[in-house]
Image (cartoon, helix red, strand yellow):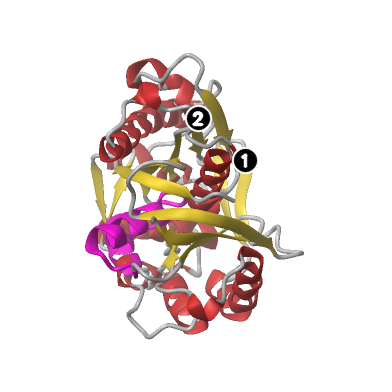
Amino acid sequence: MTPARLLGLGRATPPHILPQDVARDWARDHFSDRLPAFARMAPVFANAGIERRQIAMPVEWYLQPQDWHTRTVAYRAVARQLFIAAARDALDAAGLRADQIDMVITVSSTGIATPSLEALAHAEIGFRADVVRVPLFGLGCAGGVAGLALAARLAAAQPGARVLVVAVELCSLAFREDMATKGNVVATALFGDGAAAAVLCTEGPAQVAVAAAAEHLWPDTIDVMGWDVAPHGFGVIFAQSIPALVSRHLRQALDGLCDRLGVDPAAIGRPVCHPGGARVVEALEACLPLAPGTLDAERAVLADHGNMSAPTVLFVLQRLLESGALPEDRPGVIMALGPGFTLNAALLVPAA
């Protein structure tokens, strides 16, 4: 496809800070008496590679019983705010106004809003009445790359059109004080909240462009990751070890995607990866293969924000572009794993 140039990136996080030691103490207070395995699981808080996270609501809110209504009220309010903040940040970086956007893609899997977030934000942000709206749900951690890829495809299909993609996830709203499960403990150790946005167009100044995209869904992996839709809210599903899946299957799948993208895997420069957790980052370095410590930007984003699901990889991309760490003379790949179980990847090329 015609490369879609990345005109600007933006980001936003909520104001409430959750240090990792506080999250550990939460979990101990709420789960240790009800979950015999908690003592064995407690090191996940120290080993996750996370120092702090930003969360949608004050700490005290999570310690009270919540239901679908209260979670949805919080989601609509905070996700709308983050959508607007991240979108404006990306528009400012691109030197554009909201009324110059022709299409807007909203990626979110951690709450339900109908009308969707871009409609809730429409008047305040200043989109045109005829802006094309594309809400995406259910992509989880892969949503940042999938949304970026779709934005590039839409921009390529209508040269000159300006496409805004905004990924907003409030993972913390799925914290379930009533669920004493291993998956809930792991989620409590990993997930944070945030938003990221990007503006793409076939025209305009840019460092990089998205030249192609592809994805790979492994069969018989539906239960690896996802949501259990329960009476009081989403409940996280972790049925298999993600680092183990990465170690066993990622390299072959990525090589297949590179073949479909039309690029030699050996020609690809530094990859841009979604840091699902410290062990996932280690598994990525081992199987790609990369020297230990190569994915430093991924570790830094994880330490400062936790795993925010879909927006996280766009935080990494912004950090790498700002630092000049992406090679200017080699193609790159941005990739993320998510429910399905799926690998989404997009080919990044220097913008001519």
At 57% from the left edge and 71% from the top edge, which residue is drawn?
263
Q: Position of residue 166 (x, y in %)?
A: 43, 38
Q: Position of residue 207 (x, y in %)?
A: 33, 55
At 44% from the left edge and 57% from the top edge, which residue is drawn?
31
- Nearest the viewer among 88 and 111 is 88
Which residue in the structure is indicated by mark 2?
103
Q: Quadrant of residue 199?
A: top left
Where 87 falls versus 180 (above or below)? above
Left or right relative to 160: residue 223: right
Q: Position of residue 35 (x, y in %)?
A: 50, 62
Numbered disc 2: secondary structure: strand
User: Of tags 2 and 1, which is closer to the observer?
Assistant: 2
Q: Quadrant of residue 313?
A: bottom left
Q: Quadrant of the C terminus?
A: bottom left
At 31% from the left edge and 54% from the top edge, which residue is drawn?
318
- Badge 2 vs badge 1, beta-carbon distance below 8 Å: no
Left or right relative to 55: residue 280: right
Which residue in the structure is indicated by mark 1?
230
Real-space CA distance between mark 2 and mark 1, rounded to the nearest whole angstrom: 34 Å
The magenta region covers: 298-327
Marks 2 and 1, the one that precedes in the sequence? 2
